[in-house]
Amino acid sequence: MSLNNIESLSPVPSGSLEILEIRNIDNNSEEKIKLSLVIPTYNESKNIPTIIQKLTQLLDSRIPQQYELIIVDDNSPDKTWEVALDLMPIYPQLRVMRRTEEKGLSTAVIRGWQVAKGEVIGVIDADLQHPPETLLNLWEKIEQGADLAIGSRHVEGGGVSDWSATRRFLSRGAQTLGLVILPGVIGRISDPMSGYFLVRRRCLFGCTLSPLGYKILIEVLGRGKIGLIGEVGYIFQERQEGESKVTKQQYIDYIRHLIRLRLSLWQINRFIRFGVVGLSGVFVDMTFLYLLSDPSTLALPLTRSKIIAAELAIINNFLWNDAWTFKDISQKQPGKRQKIKRFIKFNLVCLAGLILNVLLLNFFFNVFGLNRYLANLLAIAFVTIWNYWLNLKLSWRSTEIN
Ligand code: GDD
Ligand code: MN
């Protein structure tokens, strides 16, 4: 292998695992790339020549020069990357990335997508367990308008070749677990375990995909903006060369992955922030309630005092929420008018909350005879949850349609 060859390696992106818009590609010098297919590899030197030959033949018949095959190898001990580099002169659409720092299937796929130029990006295993011919059916789904085209073992024409009862059971069990934890995500497709799919890049713009686990399709579905989905049946072939890299750890990672995605879709972090801001509001509210209503200070009537204290807390909370809790959304709606609109909505939601708050405060104070501050605290806790949901749905609603 010549030195020249090594220089043909694609650069390895570092930093965040975000999928960005395609950088301005010089349209004159390059044919526009429609499809970028990533092939993650670890010790697949024996499979690489065959899969590249087959994929090239298929894609040349359909979209000649408008595709690229990107091998992402994790510095395999069997020198898969070197074998791949040697193939480059024969296959002009082939690109090779050799990673020495990062490891793992998911990040390999994402790094490949980050250097990809295609409007459609995808992934296929290198070991020929995914039949290459199915790719053209997947491409057809995309051409028919699908955002995501998935090779599935569980639709017509799909299946597994020679799996033991245990492996079938584990695979189905994993899918059922996924359905329980993430019904809205896993429930959309028949084979969420698939690692054979194509997706429109624009559906993933701005999404940072999590590197955890093996099942990147779940990330794409959970975090991407995926409309139409097409599924194509395929038979999961037996491995002829090399070995599977699946270990017990992958099952554990899968469960962690589901839980993480669940929490992230529930926006738990956001709620915690909202709660922290809410606490600062409690402080403002309590302080003014004391200053205005306590018999030792101004001794104003309780309800009137509460309304003033609460409005000051609302202003405090809005400023913090806009700058911190919902920063990602307010940044996308930066205008003054939009901010005022958010403030008015926030106020209305909180005003409704305030009425509820006053009712609850009076109820706890007068009916249950609780201490006024404890009563106020309880009322605020109820109203925080009410406020969070309504504000999420109204005030800081991202205008994009999912
Ligand atoms: N770069 C890189 N780094 N590639 C990897 C790594 C890694 O750490 N681990 C595995 N791969 C590559 C393999 O070389 C192969 O091309 C592909 O990823 C799948 O790995 P296998 O070890 O063959 O997995 P499998 O046969 O159990 O396949 C299962 O997982 C696939 C990926 O999600 C099945 O569920 C498939 O349907 C699925 O596509
Ligand atoms: Mn495999």
Image (spheres, helix red, strand yellow):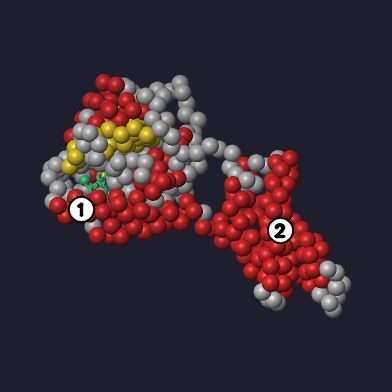
Front-most of residues 393 and 317: 393
Under 8 Å from ligand 1: the CB of mark 2?
Answer: no
**Quarter where residue 7 is shown:** top left
Residue 109, position as x, y percentages in the image: 35, 44
Image: 32 above or below 77: above
User: Which residue appears at 61% of the width and 56% of the height?
Assistant: 386
Judge whether 57 appears above or below 297 on screen: above
Q: Where does label 1 land, which residue? A: 169
- Residue to which mark 2 is pinned: 354
Residue drawn at the location 72% of the way across and 51% of the way down: 347
For residue 361, side relative to residue 171 (left or right): right
Q: Is residue 127 above or below residue 305?
A: above
Residue 172's spot in the image, x, y percent?
Answer: 24, 50
Q: Of the residues shown, which amino acid type is indicated by label 1?
A: Phe
Query: Dividing the picture into quarters, in which one does residue 319 lie?
Result: bottom right
Disc 1 to disc 2, how far (Cα)? 53 Å
